[in-house]
Image (cartoon, coloured by chain):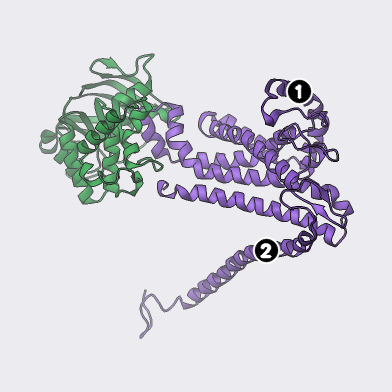
């Protein structure tokens, strides 16, 4: 249950404003792809086009194509709801549903799909929590509110919630930026394990993190202030961090700007 | 910053400003505390006033105050609140039952579905409903709606007459019934409830809404998962404010509701007339003279006061009961 994402000539707009320009890339299945780049370079915006979350913002639209194993996500008649069930997302700040218990947070997606059998629900909950490396910590208090957990645990709960609906791809938008170093390590560890089953895309501000967790890295940058963000280059993570082909990439990863 | 010798650097020179700041603090603390104490004091004084005036009348009451339906305040007094209590509670609960789904629906539409160019003017329009004086609602209800509403009521009664709430009442005609009062009260409490629900639902955090969408929720599922539960406490608070207003509404009820003929039989029907606590007190106000007779009305007022108090307390309990599950 892991599919390949192909993006070609993608432009992202908010109303008349062009936020990201001309991105073409391939995201390999069962791998971790990191998006790095300075703030405001459009990496998060671009990430949100991969499951059509950008459409939630009024005026958000794209030109170009995104395909999931050659299935066009933007073809007429494709329901964004179906896209988001296939391509899950984890956000910058942990956002468990405050009115729900740990158990119900994990099962929220399944419940939306109308799954009612207790056995299926229980089985999915345990599998998802185990996959998110949280089961041992919460198995005795599944009825407690999701927001009673620590920040790092909440983020893993959100990951469990995202994978409970068995997506093909998991998008993570700076999943560790609101967490302490120990929780960050736990999430990074988890990302490394998730790629066995999912196509994982991680946006990160932290270059060490990109170097630690990803197989390939895409570097985004603004051509100039006020210009749309663009993909500068994408390659194996090792190559990007040792011998990038663009000068601007080298400047960024060596800390000369950004 | 360089301080004078013997003074800690950075603490010395601004002493006067600091003193000024403390004075401001004290003033503000005093003002806030006074306001807080005053509120409590007013509630206590009102209670004391009501109890002091109600007790002598209650002691002279020949009938059971809680279960009697008669209202005779000339000595020997025999009065009870049953009819008033039923009319008050039934009309208010009916108003709430109608207004709650409407206000939540309107608020949801304005905050999550309507385009901005529509939601703002529409919100202003609904707020304007609150600016219409009660007396206007009363006139409108009694002279314009009631005659048109009478045939509809007859229809409902024919269809659902087997339910006690919709049973026929021969003594009341012309549509000026508890049902109509409930509907007019619903319109009257709609603006405040909608305004509160709008505030609450607009504040539902975007993060949870995105979380719901990201696991494949449709718009409505997103609203159900991440917006409505978040607004629950606020919606209940708004409903209680609305209920409080409906319970105490006087002039509109007085205008619309037909008085009950002397000695009419008890009925659960919403097609009955009657009086609420507030409308009863207001309509008899002209005849009130200091003394036991007035005490009877004050006792009725006390019950209304306690009723609103209990309603608010219950709302608190409902909200607090789920506190663990909110941010």
Total numbered labels placed on residues in the image: 2
Q: Nearer the viewer, residue B112 or B262?
A: B262
Write down the chain letter for disc 1: B
Where does the N terminus of chain B fall, quadrant-wise? bottom left
Mark 1 crowdedness (10 Å alpha carbons): few <14, some 14-19, many ≥20: some
**B49 shown above or below B297:** below
Query: Mark 2 = which residue?
Result: B42
Q: Position of residue A154 (x, y in %)?
A: 30, 44
| Separation of residues labelled 2 and 1 (CA atoms) | 46 Å
Q: Is residue B225 visible?
A: yes
Q: Colour of chain A?
A: green
Query: Mark 1 = which residue?
Result: B154
Residue at horizontal 28%, vertical 42%? A155
Q: Colour of chain B?
A: purple
**B239 shown above or below B174:** below
Decide if residue A246 is on the left or right side of residue B4.
left
Q: Nearer the viewer, residue B53 or A101?
A: B53
Q: Nearer the viewer, residue B264 or B51?
A: B264
Q: Position of residue B2 (x, y in %)?
A: 36, 77
Q: Is residue A177 visible?
A: no
Q: Quadrant of residue B150?
A: top right
Q: Quadrant of residue B126?
A: top right
């Amino acid at each position: 249950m892991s599919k390949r994402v192909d993006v070609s000539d993608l432009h992202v707009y908010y109303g008349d404003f062009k936020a990201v320009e001309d991105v073409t890339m391939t995201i390999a299945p069962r791998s971790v792809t990191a998006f790095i780049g300075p703030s405001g370079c459009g990496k998060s915006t671009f990430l949100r086009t991969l499951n059509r979350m950008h459409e939630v913002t009024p005026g958000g639209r794209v030109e170009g194509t995104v395909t999931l194993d050659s299935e066009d996500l933007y073809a007429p008649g494709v329901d964004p709801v179906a896209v988001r069930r296939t391509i899950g997302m984890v956000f910058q700040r942990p956002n468990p549903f405050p009115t729900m218990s740990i158990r119900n947070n994990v099962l929220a997606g399944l419940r939306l799909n109308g799954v009612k059998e207790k056995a299926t629900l229980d089985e999915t909950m345990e599998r998802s929590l185990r996959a998110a490396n949280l089961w041992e910590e919460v198995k005795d208090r599944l009825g407690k509110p999701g927001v009673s957990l620590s920040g790092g645990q909440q983020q893993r709960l959100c990951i469990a919630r995202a994978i409970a609906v068995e997506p093909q791809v998991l998008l993570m938008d700076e999943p560790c930026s609101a967490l302490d170093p120990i929780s960050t390590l736990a999430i990074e560890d988890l990302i490394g394990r998730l790629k066995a089953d999912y196509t994982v895309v991680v946006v990160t501000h932290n270059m060490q993190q990109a170097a630690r967790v990803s197989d390939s890295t895409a570097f985004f940058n603004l051509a100039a202030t006020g210009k749309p963000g663009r993909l500068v280059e994408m390659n194996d993570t090792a190559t990007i961090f040792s011998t990038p082909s663009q000068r601007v990439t080298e400047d960024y990863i060596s800390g000369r700007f950004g | 910053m360089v301080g004078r010798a013997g003074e800690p650097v950075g603490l010395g020179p601004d002493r006067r400003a600091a003193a000024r700041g403390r004075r401001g603090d004290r003033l503000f603390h005093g003002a806030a505390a006074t306001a807080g104490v005053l509120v409590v004091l007013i509630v206590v004084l009102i209670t004391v006033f009501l109890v002091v005036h109600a007790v002598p009348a209650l002691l002279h009451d020949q009938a059971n105050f809680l279960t009697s339906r008669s209202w005779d305040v000339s000595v020997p007094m025999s009065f009870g609140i049953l009819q008033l209590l039923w009319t008050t509670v039934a009309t208010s609960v009916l108003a709430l039952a109608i207004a709650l789904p409407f206000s939540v629906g309107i608020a949801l539409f304005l905050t999550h579905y309507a385009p901005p160019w529509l939601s703002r003017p529409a919100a202003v329009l609904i707020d304007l409903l609150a600016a219409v004086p009660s007396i206007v609602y009363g006139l409108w209800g009694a002279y314009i709606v009631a005659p048109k509403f009478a045939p509809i009521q007859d229809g409902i009664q024919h269809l659902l007459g087997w339910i006690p709430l919709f049973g026929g009442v021969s003594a009341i005609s012309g549509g000026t019934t508890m049902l109509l009062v409930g509907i007019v009260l619903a319109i009257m409490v709609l603006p405040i409830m909608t305004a509160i629900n709008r505030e609450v639902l607009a504040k539902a955090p975007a993060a949870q809404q995105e979380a719901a969408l990201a696991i494949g929720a449709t718009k409505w599922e997103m609203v159900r998962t991440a917006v409505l539960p978040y607004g629950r406490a606020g919606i209940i608070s708004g409903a209680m404010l609305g209920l409080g207003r409906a319970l105490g509404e006087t002039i509109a009820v007085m205008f619309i509701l037909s008085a009950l003929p002397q000695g009419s039989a008890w009925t659960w029907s919403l097609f009955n007339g009657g009086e609420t606590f507030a409308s009863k007190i207001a309509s008899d106000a002209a005849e009130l003279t200091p003394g036991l007779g007035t005490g009877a009305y004050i006792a009725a007022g006390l019950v209304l006061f306690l009723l609103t108090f209990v309603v608010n307390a219950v709302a608190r309990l409902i909200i607090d009961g789920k506190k663990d599950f909110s941010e």
